[in-house]
């Protein structure tokens, strides 16, 4: 396995589910800022937006961020 030196040169987006009870949203937001260097986008709902809010998630993923 190759050593990891840097993130690839690609756009990075972090989407946090505001009511997530699996991964603490405060932690997710902090990690997005500190480790990824991006401002997280908060989506209402719980851990699995691809099941509960697929249209809202698709809209975010396809948006020109």
Image: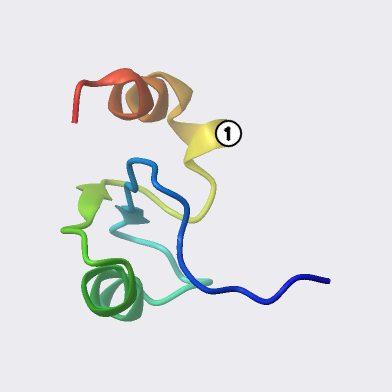
Determine which quarter of the picture holds residue 39.
bottom left
Above or below residue 53? Residue 22 is below
Above or below residue 55? Residue 24 is below
Above or below residue 21? Residue 14 is above
Q: Residues within 10 Å of mark 1 (few under 14, many from 20)?
A: few
Q: Quadrant of the C terminus?
A: top left
Residue in the picture at 37% in, 28% down = 61
Determine which quarter of the picture holds residue 55.
top left
Q: What residue is disc 1 on?
A: 51
Residue 16: image location, x then y, percent: 33, 56
Disc 1, SS: helix
Residue in the picture at 54% in, 34% down = 50
User: Would you say 32 lies left or right of 57 here?
Assistant: left
Residue in the picture at 22% in, 66% down = 37
Residue 2: image location, x then y, percent: 75, 70
User: Would you say 62 lies left or right of 48 here?
Assistant: left
Q: Nearer the viewer, residue 22 or 33?
A: 33
Q: Quadrant of the N terminus?
A: bottom right
Above or below residue 7? Residue 41 is above
Residue 18: image location, x then y, percent: 28, 58
Q: Nearer the viewer, residue 49 or 33?
A: 33
């Amino acid at each position: 396995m190759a050593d990891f030196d840097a993130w690839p040169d690609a756009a990075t987006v972090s989407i946090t589910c505001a009511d997530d009870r699996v991964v603490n949203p405060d932690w997710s937001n902090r990690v997005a800022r500190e480790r990824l260097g991006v401002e997280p986008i908060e989506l209402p709902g719980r851990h699995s937006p691809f099941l509960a809010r697929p249209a809202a998630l698709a809209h975010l993923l396809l948006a020109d961020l």
